[in-house]
Amino acid sequence: MLLAEGCAIGIDFGTTNSIVAVARPDGHVECMTWPTNFGATDTFRSALMFWREGRKLAHAAGPEAIERAVAGDRDHRFVQSLKTHLASRLFAETRLFGQRLTIEELVTVFLRHLLDGLAPIAETLPVTGGRPVVFAGERADERLALDRLAKSYAGAGLTQIEFAYEPLGAAYWYARALERDETVLVADFGGGTSDFSIMRFFRKGDGIAAKALAHSGVGIAGDTFDYRIIDHVVAPRLGKGTAYRSLEKLLPMPAYFYAAFAQWHQLSWLKSAQTLAELKSLAAASLAPNMIEDLVTIVEMDLGFELHRAVAGLKAELSFVERAHFRFEKSGVSIEAEVARDDFDAWIAPDLGRLAATMDAAIEDAGLKAVDIDAVFMTGGTSFVPAVRRIFEERFAKPRIHIGDAFQSVASGLALIAADRARLAG
């Protein structure tokens, strides 16, 4: 992608996927693409792959990391969902093949791969990076997360980056075509968090002015819904709820294996000699050894991504049909189940309640009621889940609800924000 003076960049560094958009001086916005075995893609998987080449620690990111993970042809470590660790003081560093890497260094490595095609001119252009309204994690430290994010971008060469709420980026993208003043609710559903913003847009000459009225967010999104499928469909077939024999007693399989297994960003950390040895010992003492051996295989063979893809496929299919067939078959592990949408809706019901409460809180904080919202703009893959849409349809008339591009809206809007900020500064 060729860049020139007057361009501005928006970066949506996401939990699951990342997008980079460029706003041209004429207002046209274009998203960066990357080559894959299946053709060019404008979504860059937020994943890293590490392996040893002699004494050197080699790495790949995005589509290449996924291709290497699926191939499984070498001893490697697959790392994803780094964004979920930014606000946690419990995760400061890890060791990969004996080398210590901080969370900032891991994110820097990823960002260098993500922005490789834009260097070095990108360092001289205005850049706005997205940030969630609320960072993921039970005890999320916002200041720590922003500090880590800024250091990571600086390590990747972008020392002057500014940040904006991700739903604000989506709001800008929606508002570019407005013909009248509107109060807009933006719902941005990511992989790790769901964010809501109430924006008031005003026509101002040939442009649009914006005023933020309220923001809210919650650590529930696509990954949470995937977890519910894992918990109800996959984990019971990998030994969850079974028992093993120890000193003539029957004990339940340790829950922490399945808690970590259900969180995609933690799965790769189970692949250690100590953990695998413990799992194999449990398999030998288990009353359901085949199930535990399948769990060992998934961890040992790094099959997490392919299992995630199967789970995500089921979730997507349930957005369009009432029943769907789940199937995962790899390296001797076979898991199949029929899943009804009504069951899935029941599994995620508590999460839906928290989503609705968080959205209602934003409206209340803005001093408004649902009837005062002129338009609702929804973006992110989870916006296609029927039970999520019902939350909005119950509060707003259908003609007021607009569905944006599931992936590009935020990055494109962030690029427009970067361009506006540069004009105002100039």
Image (spheres, rainbow, N blue to C red):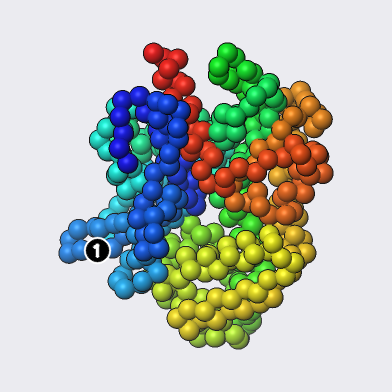
Q: Is residue 94 visible?
A: no
Q: Give the residue at the far left of this rendering.
A: 54
Picture residue at 40% right of the left edge, 30% below the top: 24
Q: Quadrant of the N terminus?
A: top left
Q: Is residue 87 above or below residue 209?
A: below
Q: Judge by depth and name the residue closer to the eye, 87 or 309.
A: 309
Picture residue at 30% right of the left edge, 37% below the top: 2
Asked which quadrant contains residue 5, the reply is: top left
Drawn side of residue 398 relative to residue 151, left or right? right
Q: Judge by depth and name the residue closer to the eye, 9 or 268.
A: 9
Say few, some or many: other residues with alpha carbon within 10 Å of mark 1 (under 14 / 14 to 19 / 20 or more): some
Q: Is residue 169 above or below residue 319?
A: above
Where residue 276 appears, x then y in whole percent?
A: 43, 73
Q: Quadrant of the C terminus?
A: top left
Q: Secondary structure at mark 1?
A: strand
- How many numbered markers are drawn? 1
Q: Judge by depth and name the residue closer to the eye, 166 or 286.
A: 166
Asked which quadrant contains residue 249, the reply is: bottom right
Q: Is residue 119 above or below residue 94?
A: above
Picture residue at 59% right of the left edge, 81% below the top: 244
Q: Is residue 198 visible?
A: yes
Where residue 83 appears, x then y in whole percent?
A: 47, 46
Where residue 223 appears, x then y in whole percent?
A: 58, 55
Which amino acid is tagged 1? Answer: Arg
User: Disc 1 designates what residue?
Assistant: 52
Where residue 202 appears, x then y in whole percent?
A: 64, 18
Picture residue at 80% right of the left edge, 39% below the top: 397
Asked which quadrant contains residue 286, the reply is: bottom right
